[in-house]
Each structure stands twice: as structure tokens, then as C-alpha cells.
Amino acid sequence: MPFLLRQAQIISICSISPANVFSQKCAKKNTQRDIIHFVVIVFIVVIKEEYLPEVKTLDKNTPEVQYLCKKDKRLAKLIDLVGPITYSPHIDNAYAFLLHEIVEQMLSAKAGQKIYNRLEDLCGGNVTPEAVHTLTNDQIKNTGTSSSKVKAIRNVTDSLMAGDLDFDSLKPLSDDDVIKQLTALHGIGKWTAKMYLIFVLDRQDVLPLEDGAFLQTYRWIYKTNDTSPASIQKKCKKWKPYSSIASRFFYRALDMGMAKKEFHLYKGET
């Protein structure tokens, strides 16, 4: 999403260790050049630790991924095809993420992103409660979104500014309680609340069976048209307690266009 830092831009910085830098510098003569170099690197480390989002990697060396691969052979094959996933929880962009999800409800990712980009432009490139609060309903609607979504955006914004909605207070709550609080707001349903759990709070065991993208990959990998909640819950029960991680690989496979070709667990499978 455009409001997030590009992960590739911060990977190299995240590998810097303050302890290593200090020991290397102390081993040398404290020349002016060395001191300046040390100060600059420490500054970068401080910026990394205070301002840059945490970067997480999911690959075959991750215990949670290894667990999933042992439990589900089709998912294991998908994980092999997708490869490592690197991501950052959107915890510092909770408001912008929530508005993005409201805009994208019942739309394709491409259409939703286009509308969100227009909203972002109206906000001067940074979607904040203060920026959105200054916009009229007509301005928001003219981005291409519906009247009901304008009402939802306004409700979330007003609730946040009035103190009725506090993102920090959601962090310690259970998944069910987070869903309960978010869905109490007009325009936020279970799908949006689950996206918040997965991508903002980084909860590990959320099964997004209401999500169209998830269902598309589900039908593809398991070769079925039965996407009833009961059927999905039964088949995906083996993923617990890492349903969110499995879902991330589902989303990434779809983003990579893998579902355009037939999924084969084994060579010659029909």
C-alpha cells in the first residue's frame, strides 16, 4: 500500500547491530573520522529502532511455517512455490489501513487502490484523522466511493477524534473482543475486522473465510467449489494456531498470479 514504507528500503538497515558497531569502533584508534562514522551509524540504528516498522520473514526455517508444512501437504507445496514472505505489521498506520479496507470492501484490489489513491491525494499524501476531518462528504464521495462508505469513513474518523475509538486499547484484547469493538462501528463488518487482526495486530490464528481472495486460492489449491464456512473450518482446522500465516501465503500466491494455472500437488495429478 502507498502509505507504507517499502520493505526493501529498510532490510539492510535492520541488519545493523549497535553492539557490533560499538565493539568494532572501540577496537580502533578513536580518530575524529572514526568517531563521526560511529555517531552516524548509531543515529541510523536509533532511527531504525524508533521509527521504522518491524520486519518479519516467513520461510521454511520459521517454526510456524514448518508446523504448517507438516500438517497440510497442499499448503506445503504452495509455500514452496511462493517462497519466503517478508512483511511489516501496519501497527503505526492503523487508521489509514482501516480506511483502505473500508474503501476496498466489495471491490477488486485494483479498483479499491485507485479510489484510496484519490483519497490520499486529497489528504496531501498522508491519510490521517485530522486530514480526513477537514474534507467534506462530497469530496470523499467524489473519489469514487459510495455514500455508505463515506458514512463509515466519517464515523471512524469522528470516533477516533472524539476518543471513542482507541487503537492502542485494542492491542491487549482477544481476537473476538477486537472484532466486537470494530464491528460496533458503522460500515465495519467481520471481514474488515479480520483484516485488521491479521495485518495490523499481526494475530496468528485468524481464518478469513469471508474474504474473496482467500476463497479464490482455497478453491484453487484444494480443487473444490465447496466454500461453505463449515467446510473451510473443517479443512483448515489443522492450521491452528497459525491460520493467519497460512492465509498470508494464500494471498501472496494470488498476488503472484499462480491461481491462473492448474495447481498440482504431484506430477500427473488431474
Image (cartoon, rainbow, N blue to C red):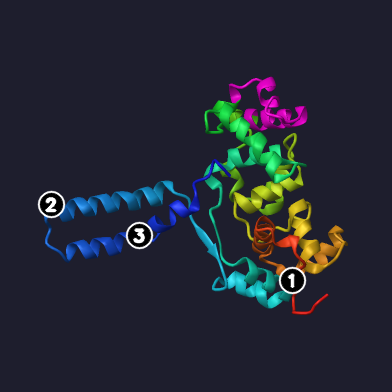
Give the prevailing secondary structure in the magenta stretch: helix
Sequence-wise first label, 1 or 2 = 2
Instruction: Give SS at disc 2.
Output: helix
Mark 1 nearby-residue class (10 Å; few <14, some 14–19, many ≥20):
some
Q: What distance separates the C-alpha of mark 1 from that of mark 3?
A: 38 Å
Q: Residue 1: x and y, percent?
A: 58, 44
- Check residue 32 in the rendering and tell me which mark sits there, or answer none: 2
**Disc 3 marks which amino acid?**
Ile
Q: Are marks 3 and 2 in contact (CB under 8 Å)?
A: no
| Magenta stretch holds residue 137 | yes
Q: Which residues are magenta?
A: 133-158
- Evaluate whether residue 22 shows in this view: yes
Counting the numbered discs, the total is: 3
Sequence-wise first label, 1 or 3 = 3
- Check residue 16 in the rendering and tell me which mark sits there, or answer none: 3
Q: Residue at x 67, y 64 (%)?
A: 246
Sequence-wise first label, 3 or 2 = 3
